[in-house]
Image: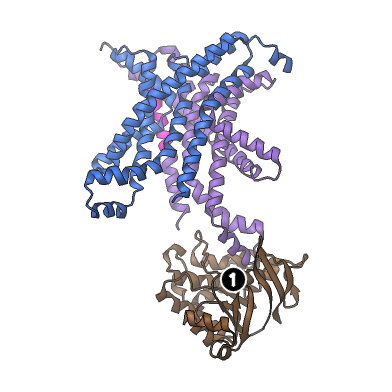
């Protein structure tokens, strides 16, 4: 082994990489917010009386779950380009991950809804609550607890998926920044090992804060 | 002031479970409904506050037709409390919050008012010590008493009890029956679907015996339980006593 | 747009090239699943039965594979290979990284399957005179398998989709091969749709099978 590790340049680049990590976190968070929104839309659509709506929702879910995330990002970036829709790499990445998140979360929400017993709705209605009120005050909080863990899992997934942005030319997120540094210096191992550590810490940040939140939120 | 049930029929798909029931419960009365499983007793209760639609007949609560198109069911349900066999505590709320929820959100009471009502009702059923506890920490009997307090907090004119002791361990039945005894002694109008024959005999003004979707016998407990006339009633009582 | 789709310069040769890419995807998946499952079963059982001072560090190490993007894992492994002077082809590196990656998830699946068997059931088995190993093979294993298999199928499909990332270290699999064709004929939507269709055809039937198995076993409970 004739290799000498050069960690110093990597550590000097740390501030740049941390800024990248912030972009990573930003994309992941945005993709989760949008993903939750579309997942609710999909869950509602899959229960709709219109066949076309149900079909569209089912296709979204199956496509999101049965093709690689990288493929979905490619589609957003190159594929939509053929239709005259040109997204920049940030938006394409965000669109790809959102598409993926929504597909997985729609299933999660459907399961969560089934897991709250129908008798809860009935008990709430018997106290004079309306359908919407009963759903909001009684069913939804219970559903939220059931989907909370899968939701944080998906957030970790979203962070991991942001690394794929480099493939469509994104250079501002953690992987993108790391790759730029790498191309300039070819200290691949050092830079990427450091990036790995930062990703690990980001993932832990999510799981630990989720655990704290769960501890505060779900006392029952 | 009464619950007036007139020739009510109710089917689930092709299965008719209530086959023409007529019965009036006057304000201040306690009526117990006894009978075998699947005789349609519980279904009838669900129809009284509109949780289940009916196929024909009418149910009038203080003159309001429950199943008429224009009836505001949410309004109507405020004066009919119901307690279920499965107590259906809201698991994400504390005991106090369980009872406060409907007064606040349905009746629009302030937090302080709702809390005062909830504390009063919970003390009444003997749960004053458990206000800040989550239902999962309560026994079945305690959860059932909480469910009673939750219904009482809406100041209902009528209380419906749907086999509220059937899912309880035998040693917990007593505390729930005591709570119901207390309510009846205070003059609450109650319809009690129950398997506790001795309890029915003790608290009721009248007892109705349900069999295969019909009322076979109705009258004072001394008559229906003490001296039944119909062969079905005699068979049923023999099987449970 | 429609005419451009029909009037494509996409040839049969291109399709053949993509199918070969799909073959590489399947080969990578195959080795990753074999290696990942073997390791995952060993680690999973160890995690289920060992005391905390073995369980906790093992869990922590495996957690790293689930908390770092696979792309980064591949790059780090590939550059590390160069540093220590192992002369593996990229395909081998890809298989090894994917196998470790899969083992981290598989461990958790095996462990929860193992822990899903109630102690009372095991006690009942032992009370009938079964030995420890008989209990494991006739009671624990069949029950754990039912719990674990649907998740394992899901994981296998997940790994198949994740193989798409190995192009970064120079392997031409399905997605990379379609990218090569896109660069030449400049019809990304068309070519990517074919790639998506191939992925879907490889994944969807197995996903359905998994869902069916899960449903059937749940009904039997």
Q: Residue at x 56, y 67 (%)?
A: B100
Q: Residue at x 36, y 18 (%)?
A: C93
Query: Along the line of sight, which residue is nearer the eye, A33 or A53?
Result: A53
Q: Is residue B34 left or right of residue C122?
A: right
- Residue A170 screen position, x and y as percent: 54, 21
Q: Residue at x 29, y 13 (%)?
A: C86
The residue singled out by tag 1 in the image is B42
Residue A197 lies in the magenta stretch: yes
Quadrant in which residue B47 is drawn: bottom right
Q: Give the residues in magenta.
A: A191-205
Residue C177 lies in the magenta stretch: no
Quadrant in which residue C144 is drawn: top left
Q: Name the image quarter holding the N terminus of chain B.
A: bottom right
Colour in which chain B is drawn: brown
Colour in which chain C is drawn: blue
Q: Mark 1, chain letter?
A: B
Colour in which chain A is drawn: purple
């Amino acid at each position: 082994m004739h290799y000498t590790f050069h960690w110093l340049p990597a550590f000097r680049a740390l501030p740049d990489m941390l800024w990248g990590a912030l972009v990573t976190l930003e994309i992941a968070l945005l993709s989760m917010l949008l993903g939750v929104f579309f997942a609710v839309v999909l869950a509602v659509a899959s229960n709709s009386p219109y066949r076309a709506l149900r079909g569209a929702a089912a296709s979204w879910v199956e496509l999101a779950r049965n093709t690689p995330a990288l493929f979905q990002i490619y589609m957003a970036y190159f594929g939509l380009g053929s239709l005259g829709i040109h997204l920049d790499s940030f938006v394409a990445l965000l669109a790809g991950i959102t598409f993926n998140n929504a597909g997985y979360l729609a299933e999660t929400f459907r399961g969560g809804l089934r897991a709250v017993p129908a008798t809860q709705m009935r008990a709430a209605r018997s106290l004079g609550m309306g359908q919407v009120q009963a759903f909001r005050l009684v069913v939804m909080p219970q559903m939220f607890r059931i989907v909370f863990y899968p939701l944080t899992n998906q957030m970790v997934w979203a962070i991991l998926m942001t690394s794929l942005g480099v493939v469509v030319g994104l250079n501002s997120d953690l992987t993108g920044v790391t790759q730029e540094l790498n191309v300039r210096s070819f200290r691949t191992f050092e830079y990427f090992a450091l990036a790995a550590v930062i990703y690990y810490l980001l993932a832990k940040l999510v799981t630990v804060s989720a655990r704290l939140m769960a501890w505060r939120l779900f006392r029952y | 002031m009464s619950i007036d049930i007139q020739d009510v029929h109710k089917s689930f798909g092709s299965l008719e479970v209530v086959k023409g029931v007529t019965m009036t419960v006057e304000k201040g009365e306690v009526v117990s409904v006894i009978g075998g499983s699947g005789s349609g007793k519980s279904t009838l209760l669900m129809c009284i506050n509109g949780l289940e639609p009916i196929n024909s007949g009418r149910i009038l609560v203080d003159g309001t037709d429950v199943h008429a198109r224009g009836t505001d069911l949410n309004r109507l349900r405020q004066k009919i409390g119901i307690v279920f066999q499965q107590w259906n505590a809201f698991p994400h709320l504390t005991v106090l919050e369980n009872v406060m929820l409907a007064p606040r959100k349905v009746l629009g009471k302030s937090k302080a008012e709702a809390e005062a009502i909830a504390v009063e009702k919970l003390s009444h059923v003997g749960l004053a010590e458990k206000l800040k506890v989550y239902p999962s920490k309560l026994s079945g009997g305690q959860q059932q008493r909480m469910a009673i307090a939750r219904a009482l907090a809406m100041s209902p004119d009528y209380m419906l009890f749907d086999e509220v002791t059937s899912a309880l361990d035998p040693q917990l039945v007593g505390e729930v029956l005591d709570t119901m005894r207390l309510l009846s002694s205070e003059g609450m109008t109650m319809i009690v679907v129950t398997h506790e024959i001795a309890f029915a005999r003790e608290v009721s003004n009248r007892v109705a015996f349900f069999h295969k979707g019909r009322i076979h016998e109705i009258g004072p407990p001394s008559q229906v339980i003490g001296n039944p006339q119909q062969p079905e009633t005699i068979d049923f009582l023999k099987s449970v006593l | 747009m429609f005419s451009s789709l029909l009037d494509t310069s996409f040839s049969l040769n291109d399709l053949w090239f993509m199918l070969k890419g799909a073959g590489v995807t399947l080969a990578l998946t195959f080795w990753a699943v074999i290696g990942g499952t073997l390791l995952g079963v060993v680690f999973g059982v160890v995690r289920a039965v060992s005391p905390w001072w073995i369980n906790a560090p093992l869990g922590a190490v495996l957690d790293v594979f689930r908390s770092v993007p696979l792309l980064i894992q591949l790059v780090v492994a590939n550059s590390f290979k160069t540093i220590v002077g192992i002369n593996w082809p990229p395909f081998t590196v890809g298989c090894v990284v994917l196998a470790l990656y899969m083992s981290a998830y598989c461990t958790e699946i095996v462990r929860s399957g193992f822990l899903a068997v109630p102690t009372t059931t095991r006690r009942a088995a032992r009370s009938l005179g079964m030995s420890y190993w008989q209990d494991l093979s006739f009671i624990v294993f069949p029950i754990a398998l039912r719990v674990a298999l649907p998740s394992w199928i899901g994981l296998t499909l997940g790994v198949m989709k994740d193989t798409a990332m190995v192009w970064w270290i120079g392997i031409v699999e399905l997605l990379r091969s379609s990218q090569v064709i896109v660069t030449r004929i400049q019809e990304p939507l068309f070519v990517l749709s074919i790639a998506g269709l191939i992925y879907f055809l490889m994944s969807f039937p197995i996903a359905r099978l998994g869902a069916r198995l899960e449903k059937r076993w749940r009904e039997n409970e």
